[in-house]
Amino acid sequence: MTKSATSYDDAIKAALSGEYAAIYAYGVIGAYLSGSARSLALQTETAHRNLRDQMLDTVADPPAPAAEYAMAAPVTSVATALAAAAGVENKCTALWRAAVAAAGAEQRQSALTEMINAALRAAAFRRLGGAMPGTVAFPGQ
Amino acid sequence: MVFTCAVPRFDQVTRRHVLGAAGLTAAAAAAAPALAGCSSPPPPKTVDQTVAQDATIGPLYTETTALITAYDQAITDNPALAAALGQLREEHRQHAIALAGLMGAVNPSISPGATTAGPSMVASGAPPAPPSPNPSASAIAGSLSTAEKTAQGNAATACLAATGDRVAVLASIAACRSTHVAALAALR
């Protein structure tokens, strides 16, 4: 099956919009965390910012960030912050998975790398929340 | 795919035969010409058949079942790890089912639970074997991690070369195996 350029463009723009949302979310999440969890959240936020900047340099006609964002569920504690972080990474995994599926041969490796990075972070936040091993069979599905 | 015609389920065929004995209904009569084109649908392939035929997914399937066996052995060697390793094993089992599906094979029969060896039976009169110490969690995690890394690379390579519906499934399998390596590192 041949994927059209349009569907890959749509998928990569959706992934960029997901990066915007993730950056917003870590501004909320980080405030509730300390120690190694806070370090991971800060490191993750930086990764999302770097990816956003790189995409703004390379994606043609990139979408603008939304005027406002809302968390999927209230973040009021360490537990809800870790759950929110896992949820954000799960969503990014799904968006990048769609980009992998739509990508041609030249773009697929980079999309797969971002998908895997998000899946790794989702599992890491689940483990910090007490789930062991914190993995799922089909990340992003 | 060659399955361009609906393959009647066994129970539907039986029902149609019953209807035929009592006189065909209008609906059954209308369906009959369509079914005539598929009078001899190929039987579902077994996993063993498809593994040999599919040069891309076949080796991944074989590697996945080998990982399941490795997890079974690890859980037998160190039952204290059963909870964490059992979930990783289960995820590989789900991958095996998905890979079989991609090859058009019927579901493989892989035990959903880890199969652990029972206590070894010692023939009466033989000297009892000295107990061998269980491999440490660290040693087991290290060994499994090596296998997972290789398998992850193979799934990623297959994903990059795949087409159609296979791409997303292989991407998820590759990503899952990456998370397994990280989870095993957390066990060490």
Image (cartoon, coloured by chain):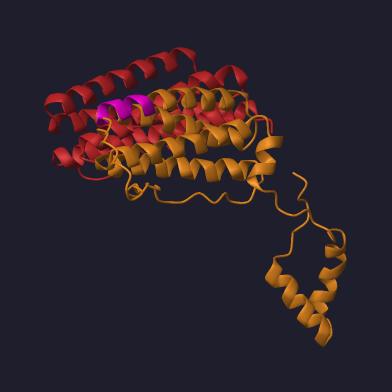
Chain colours: A red, B orange
Say which quadrant the C terminus of chain B sits in.
top left
Q: Left of B60 or right of it: where is B133? A: left
Where does the image place residue B47, in percent across and percent down from the top left? 63, 45
Q: In the figure, B7 relative to B135: above or below?
A: below
Identify which residue, B154 or A16, lies in the foreground.
B154
Of helix, strand and loop, which mostly describes the magenta segment?
helix
Residue B15, by quadrant, is: bottom right
Q: Quadrant of residue B165?
A: top right
Residue B142 shown in magenta:
yes
What is the total number of numbered labels drawn onto the structure image? Answer: 0
Which of B25 and B81 lies nearest the eye of the viewer? B81
| B147 w.r.t. B67: above or below | above
Screen quadrant of the N terminus of chain B: top right
- Of A66 and A50, nearer the camera is A50
> Residue shown at 44%/29% (left/top)?
A15
Residue drawn at x 48%, y 29% is B174
Q: In the image, residue B146 lies at what x, y percent?
A: 40, 23
Which residue ends up furthest to the bottom in the rendered image? B22
- Magenta stretch encompasses residue B17: no
Please say whether residue A52 is visible from this viewpoint: yes
Image spot of residue B149 (x, y percent)? 43, 23
Where residue B54 sits, quadrant-wise, is: top right
- Residue situated in front as seen by the camera: B6 or A85: B6
Q: Which residue extends farthest front?
A: B125
At which x and y percent is residue A63?
45, 26
Reply above or below: B116 against B22. Answer: above
- Residue drawn where x is 35% and y is 44% of the image: B86
Q: Is residue B86 left or right of residue B152?
A: left
Q: Is residue A65 visible?
A: no
Q: Which residues are magenta?
A: B136-144
